[in-house]
Image (cartoon, coloured by chain):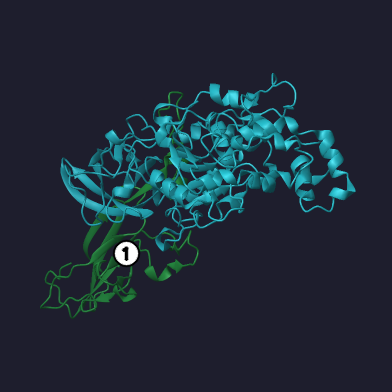
Amino acid sequence: MDGAITDGSSLVILRMFPKLPFNLTYNLSIDPDLPHVIGTPLLLGSLSPTSQPVPELPLDAANENGGNLSIDSNGDGLAYYRPPLNFRLLNGDPNKEAKDIYIHTLSNNGGELNDLFTEPFTLRRPPIVLVHGLLGSKSTWENDQWKDEQAPFATLQRSVDYSDTNIDGFAENFAKIPKTIQDVLGDLRTGKANAKDEWNKGKKFAATRVDVVAHSLGGLLTKWFVADLGAAQLVARGGSYSNFTTAKAPDTNYLRDNNFGGGDIRRFVSLDSPYQGSPLATQLAPLVDPIKVSAWLNNDANKVKSYYEKVKHIFYKNGDISGTFKYPNAAKDLSFASPALQLLSTAVYPIGRKAVLWRPMVGIADNPAAGDTISDDIFSFLFQIVPNVFSPLDALNPADSDLIVSTTSQRNGVDFSDSEKEKFEFHRHIHTGNVAGFKGAPQSDEMAARVRGLLTADPAADDFRVLDK
Amino acid sequence: MSLRGLDPSTTSFRFHYAASDPAQVVYSQDPLNPITLPDGGFLRIWTKDGATERQLSDFIMPDHDYSASDLGLAAGTPQKTLWLEGIAPASAAGNQEVELTSRLEGVLTPLFLDKLNTTPTKVVAIDAQAFGPKVNADGSADLADKNFLAADHKDA
């Protein structure tokens, strides 16, 4: 390994080759020429002997130290190194994505220390995994606000893409999240991760945890993953949910032996995720009628319509209308008090040092113009696409729509504190393009700036709560 | 090294050691394997410190005869500092030897001057999650599991 993902996200074992007939002293420093001076402030992480229990992750800031550690090199010559929680605050630019520290190794003969050699070790911050929402795709994040290694700040980014199964439920879609997380961590470990900084190219990093930024449904999928609810059996959700059971595939478990039970996510920011259900989905779900959909798709008059192909793919696998009707289970799962939401509200979430730090952001639009355009949004988003399938949509209460995130539409949301209901003047749930100046959450400069502030905050800042019910 | 009374005009010197020849290093554009070292070498001896810009001509080749003047030795400068660089970690403490012999003009038998034992060392960092020891049920490491110390993690 040439480095580690930091902010308490990875555990490294230092090993000396070969074993030496005297004790070694490891010392961490930001100076390639000088070992750290004991007694001065440290931001370098912790060293501990392997004869002690494995340090847990994430790390405890109060436990941070990085002074000399003498180990018995006649034994295995091993030490645990836990990277620092706050490496950004090391020397130099706090916004720089990577920083080098130096591992000084000294011989220790009865307390007489002599330099053996010094090796550089690169610290990088956790990558961000982006999770889009219902009817979204990777393109949700393809804008100026989200750019790999550039915006909202310099770090690796990787997008989850479940667009081809988008309207399926939580159980069908969540597994793309651990897959993407393990892909990006694997690339960092093998030196395949892209790096704009020349000196980082090809370096291998100890990488265990990512930060997740999720929009809308993506937040619920992430929570489903952390709750270890697994892949539910593919039961029809139309009737009873009594046989809605879960089955976990080993590689989608959140806490696994191969990460010392530490989990994959350090911090989790969700943008406008309806954790207690979506008003819009609640009203739409009962309206979906397979007979009506089939009739509409088989009507030649509709086959010339621009959105015909989209409707086919929503309700039939690969758009094959001779196949089995595919219920949009996301709408069911997002309905108020659905069995899926009940599972999320009764699940057991990691606690203590394994807890996921969570910031459920809700941007409340507080601009009169936003409310005035609600009907425009609904027409463009739904009416014009599937007018017959979703009729009578005019029964929908505009104030309950998720498209404009208002205090009304979030009335059934998580019990957010006032500080978490942040006001973003030109903010909508999704970007429809109907009204210039108004953007969806992932496209909003204001939202991206807040995420930047949250993910680069000092760990001691009280910006996050523990992910729970 | 020191002339120790030897005549610089008639004495040559030879270093015997497991050298890693810098001329045999292969450079590549592959970011994962930017350099490939020749097999078998552990050490390099140089006439210049690493802090200065070294040339291949500053490298002391093993089993090669150098005149005193090649090494910068003369009657007026009877001592010369050479620098030893560890390239690959030794397999055991002290098992890398450097032997210095000299040959006097007209004398066939080399004269043993000195020998030193050294230990090129290296610290490697191992990704504990990917390659660490097995984990006990209580989350502690199973230190009896030494598989993670296998040689294939040398470059982890």
As drawn, the chain in green is B
Total marks placed: 1
Where does the image place residue A242, in percent across and percent down from the top left?
69, 18
A360 lies above or below B107 = above
- Residue A151 appearing in the image: yes
Identify the image quadrant of residue B23: bottom left
Residue at (50% x, 25% y) in the render = A469
Q: Is residue A83 left or right of residue B151?
A: left
As drawn, the chain in cyan is A
The amino acid on which the numbered mark 1 sits, given as a three-letter code, is Arg
Residue at (88% x, 44% y) in the render = A298
Residue at (72% x, 27% y) in the render = A237
- Near mark 1 (Cα within 10 A), the count class, few <14, some 14-19 or many ≥20, is many
Which chain hosts label 1? B
A445 lies above or below A469 = below
Of residue A132 and residue A212, the one placed in the foreground of this image is A132
Of residue B30 and residue A387, the one placed in the foreground of this image is A387
In this view, the residue farthest toward the bottom is: B9
The image quadrant where one finds the N terminus of chain B is bottom left
Where does the image place residue A48, in percent across and percent down from the top left?
30, 36
The residue singled out by tag 1 in the image is: B44
Of residue A135 and residue A192, the one placed in the foreground of this image is A135
- Residue A441 appearing in the image: no
Of residue B82 and residue A55, the one placed in the foreground of this image is A55
Q: Is residue A281 left or right of residue B70?
A: right
A67 lies above or below B21 = above
Where does the image place residue B50, in percent across and percent down from the top left?
26, 66
A75 lies above or below B79 = above
